[in-house]
Image: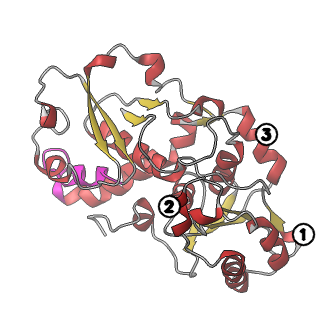
Amino acid sequence: MFACEPGPVVGGYGDRIVGLIAVRVMAKLLNREFQILWTRDDLSSYFEYSAFDHEKLKPYDAWFRNLRMIDQPRRIAEHLRTSPSPLAEPGDFKRTDLLGVSISVNTETAQYLFQNPRIVNRGQARAEYLRVMKWAYQTLHTEVLKPTPRVLKRMQEVVGDRTGLVGIQIRAGDAFMKTGTAWDKRTQYLEGEAGVKRTLENIRARLDPTVMVFVTGDHPQTVKLAREVFGEAHVLGDDEPAQHLDRRQAEKLDQTKLYSDALILAQRCSELHISSNSNFGRVAALAGGVETVYGLDGQPLSTLELFSKTRTVFD
């Protein structure tokens, strides 16, 4: 079970989906049922996932071993690589009567299970890793998290019926969002408006000047700056300021823009230019019909590179 519950930080939307995918892939390899426990906020307003919702399926609520692995991608790496029965042993909790494992994770952890020769043939491990991970991402929004009419309506308002767009996602830093957290002021990847505009100008120099772009980012002026750089007629975007899902200033803020932007990148764009240090763009690149993905520096990103912000064991 993938767990996203109240308490310490679990990461933003991209981090959460990376964790969800890892748990789903491990469940598939181990022939175990997959469930989701997402109680940190109301995901059901934005995605229909009743077939996997633990809150609706929970006959064994007291029987789960809890495994918290936030920002600890290698915590159980050796266990996954070598155990004869991964995630079915007592482990840290010394219990033999537990029926499931509740995992809170925000990094790509499934890769280590593909190194276990009892689970995957060594000669096929890399190919199987690519195949199963692609399956998990490609079915994310068709089988697991199906967008609700609320999100689909917002997508339609922003891009209409357009497809084949060039998508741009710029992670400027938490400092530019209203998170109410003093620590976030230290997180700056770009130099404010000047840095965002310079990044957009660099991307524009690599594109056909007649192209239509969809733009999203965490700096509140991202769409406005894109219209200055590309021209008003060539830019689509939702002007509402971005929220950090894990550090928003109120519990019941409308998150529709967040999910709409993610799905537009994934489903309405054929080419993406994304911040490679952001899982938001990586998830979008993997979870839809995107054909080509570049970092903001113009370098192409391979499928393996998109799975994890750090190198995978199969790189």
Asked if labels 1 and 3 touch by Cβ distance under 8 angstroms, the answer is no
Q: Looking at the rendering, which quadrant does residue 37 occupy? A: top left
Q: Earlier in the sequence, mark 3 or mark 1?
A: 3
Q: For this rendering, which residue is in front, 198 or 299?
A: 198
- Residue 161 in sight from this viewpoint: no
Asked if labels 3 and 2 touch by Cβ distance under 8 angstroms, the answer is no
Give the Cα distance between marks 3 and 1: 22 Å
> Which amino acid lies under the numbered mark 1 shown in the image of this protein?
Ala
> Which amino acid lies under the numbered mark 3 shown in the image of this protein?
Lys
Q: Identify the residue at image location x=32%, y=38%.
A: 103
Circle 3 crowding by C-alpha within 10 Å: few under 14, some 14–19, many from 20: some
Image position, residue 283 (x, y; %): 52, 55
Q: Earlier in the sequence, mark 2 or mark 3?
A: 3
> Which amino acid lies under the numbered mark 2 shown in the image of this protein?
Trp
Which residue in the structure is indicated by mark 3?
A: 153
Q: Which residues are magenta?
A: 108-122
Image quadrant where one finds the C terminus: bottom left
Image position, residue 196 (x, y; %): 68, 76
Mark 1, secondary structure of its residue: helix
Q: Residue furthest right?
A: 233
Image quadrant where one finds the N terminus: top left
Q: Identify the residue at image location x=68%, y=80%.
A: 203
Give the Cα distance between marks 2 and 3: 35 Å
Circle 2 crowding by C-alpha within 10 Å: few under 14, some 14–19, many from 20: few
Which callout, 2 or 3, points to the residue nearer the camera? 2
Mark 3, secondary structure of its residue: helix
Q: Residue furthest top?
A: 59
Which residue in the structure is indicated by mark 1?
A: 233
Q: Which mark is residue 183?
A: 2
